Amino acid sequence: MKTRCQFLSEDEQLKVHEKSIKILEEVGVQFLSEKALKVLKKNGARVDYSEKLAKIPREMVDQALKTAPKSFVLGARNPEFDVPYPSAHTGYVLDGGGVFTFDYKKSERRYATLQDCENAFRVFEEMSIGSYVWPHSVPDLEKTYPNSSQIFLKI
């Protein structure tokens, strides 16, 4: 027996897509990375560098959806742990915690740091239900650490 789960109907999915396009085109998305803003502008987005805001047109989204692969593999250091998508397996993912974090010691919201990333990894590593870790986003990481793709955390 296979379990199938569908949260939204086809009509609801279309409504979400159309509202998302409207937000991307009219409101835009704030990107803290100047590198990302340059790539978006080069590919057709309207960019306001002072606000770090990109307004992404429908055509750009449509092109991205047309050219995105229908399946792919998230490769692990050990191929035994590769995760193919789409996948029949569901697991938990640590997406790095995002750009902001809540500092429980100071009771305040602030930008995340590499130390926050490391702390989150340590907790997730102890959880048996975890599947994999998605890279962490830290504002202006490429300015602080120009070779940020080469940062390795010792956990």
Image (tube, rainbow, N blue to C red):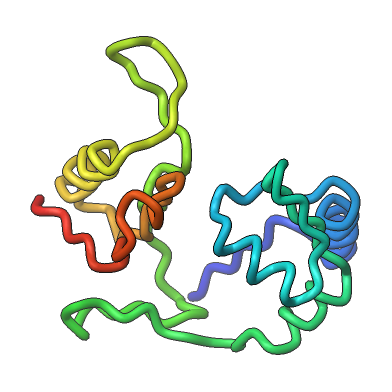
In the image, residue 66 lies at what x, y percent?
75, 87
- Identified at 45% across, 44% down, the residue is 139
Q: Residue at x 24, y 67 (%)?
A: 150
The percent position of residue 68, horizontal first and vertical second, equals 64, 84
Report if residue 132 is visible in the image. Answer: no
Q: Toward which corner of the image does residue 7 lie, by quadrant?
A: bottom right
Asked whether 55 or 76 is in front, the reply is: 55
Q: Quadrant of the rendered structure where residue 116 is?
A: top left
Outermost residue, left side? 154
Label tally: 0
Q: Does 107 sit above or below residue 96?
A: above
Residue 51: which quarter of the image? Answer: top right
The answer to whether residue 35 is left or right of residue 107 is right
Task: Work out whether 33 lies above or below 84.
Answer: above
Which percent across, then down, holds residue 5? 61, 62
76 lies left or right of 101? left
- Examine the rendered structure and indicate whether residue 71 appears above or below residue 111: below
Name the residue at 67% across, 62% down. Answer: 6
Q: Is residue 25 above or below residue 69?
A: above
Is residue 17 found left or right of 104 in the rendered image? right
| 61 with respect to 115 (left or right) | right
In-front residue for pair 132/44 = 44
Residue in the picture at 65% in, 66% down: 38
Q: Position of residue 83 (x, y in %)?
A: 35, 77
The answer to whether residue 15 is seen in the rendering is yes
Q: Nearer the viewer, residue 54 or 108?
A: 54
Which residue is at the front of the view, 130 or 31? 31
